Image: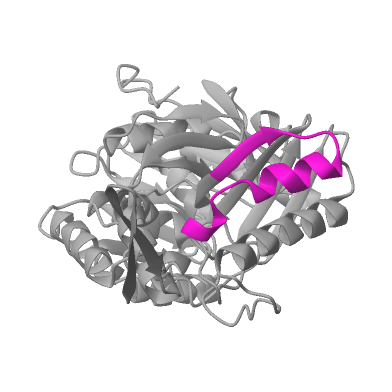
Amino acid sequence: MVKHKTWLTGACTVFQVEWDFPTLFLYKKGMNKMKKFNLMATCSAGLEGLVGDELRDLGYKPEVRNGMVLFTGTVSDIIRTNLWLRTADRIKIIVGRFRATTFDELFEKTKSLDWEDLIPMDGKFPVEGRSQKSSLHSVPDIQAITKKAIVEKISKFYHRRTRLPESGSLYPLEVRVNKDEVMDTLDTTGPSLFKRGYRVAKGEAPLKENMAAALILLTNWHPEEMPFLDPMCGSGTIPIEAALIARNIAPGYNREFVFEDWDWVDPELVKKIRAEADAKADYDSQFDIMASDVNEQMVNYAKVNAEEAGLLHDIQFKQVAVQDFHTDKQDGVLVTNPPYGQRMGDSKEVAQLYHEMGKVFIPMKTWSKYYLTSDLNFEKEYGKKATKRRKLYNGRIRTDYFQYWAEQNFNKKGKK
């Protein structure tokens, strides 16, 4: 409810508007619908360029940084990028950026930000923190002071004299301090974007879904023109991500996001943008995706996950050992994440596997082959030097993506 007070002063009539809190937050809700936010897509080291490419394809103008890609957008764009980005980890709102070398500076500058525009009186807002090469290096103190500043700001806005209840929706916050530069962010995603919702059966050392998508997007694969193969598919992440790409299915379509519980995000807008994403899916195109593994149980896990993703009939699964694999198909793309020492398996067994891979796959001259492993001796054991290798991080493990371009298709190279 909006209340009006009127009184006369000289020749003028003065109006004072008093807002009750529900009405005031509804006003803020309307403002947020139209607001342009500074946004950040976080990602694993080495994938920033891919995330930037994805954002450009969606119509944004990204700025690539280490471990993140910056862009601007409205609430609609927050929804859309969470649904569509295949290689990012999270979409965050940058609430504020400033320099601070003392805790007093951190407190006052944090308090000056417009937290009341984003977090309601009952909002639950845990604060995570990190610090690198900064005067403020105690992460627990950074978190506590940031939290205190936000509590004071919201309490003052709502004329609250007792503790904030924090009994409502979740608003996950992070404060990063890097070389005395502070960045306060609000996570709009919740569980990382790699959690698509289809991996119900897990094998040993599974590859994250967004990394699997990145491996595919770094190749020269054209779904309707070239067969695709993962000969060590494990629980099926790579072939499932390939099918999602081939069908143009939004990777976040079958999951929920933390922003869906926020008062200022319209459920009808979310529903509309989800429907738009569904309409863009291509269920008619024809393509050839093959996946195999030596372990029958892993093949069964992969089938379960593919069925959960609604893509079981788009992938040809088979139990077969690498040394027994054969195909007469030509001009294909092979992408796989073979076992490696830091991840799993005995080093001698892994070396023998790489040797067998070389014997089977090197003769497939019309195929482009891509292997992700942390083993720096891979080329020696495989028996051939890679056309190109790219450094990537699989979780915290530093890996190399060994790329062998098809001898007859050097005009269709993978992305730089």
**What's the colour scheme?**
one colour
Foreground pick, 316 / 308: 308
**Does the magenta portion include 46?**
no
Foreground pick, 291 / 416: 416
Quadrant holding the N terminus: bottom left
Q: Position of residue 50 (x, y in %)?
A: 44, 34
Q: Position of residue 143 (x, y in %)?
A: 78, 56
Taking 338 as reference, is 244 left or right?
Answer: left
Taking 214 as reference, is 31 left or right?
Answer: left
Taking 244 as reference, is 299 left or right?
Answer: right
Which of the 4 image quarters holds residue 57?
top left
The residue shown at (42%, 32%) is 52
Taking 160 as reference, is 367 left or right?
Answer: left
Say above or below: 337 vs 195: above
Which residue is at the far left? 284
Work out whether residue 78 can be spotted. Answer: yes
**Does the magenta portion include 107?**
yes
Q: Which segment is the magenta one?
A: 95-117
Quadrant holding the C terminus: top left
Foreground pick, 288 / 304: 304
Foreground pick, 236 / 329: 236
The residue shown at (46%, 46%) is 87
Work out whether residue 352 can be spotted. Answer: no
Q: Position of residue 45 (x, y in %)?
A: 62, 37
Say above or below: 50 vs 16: above
The residue shown at (50%, 42%) is 40
Q: Position of residue 9 (x, y in %)?
A: 36, 53
The residue shown at (88%, 34%) is 135
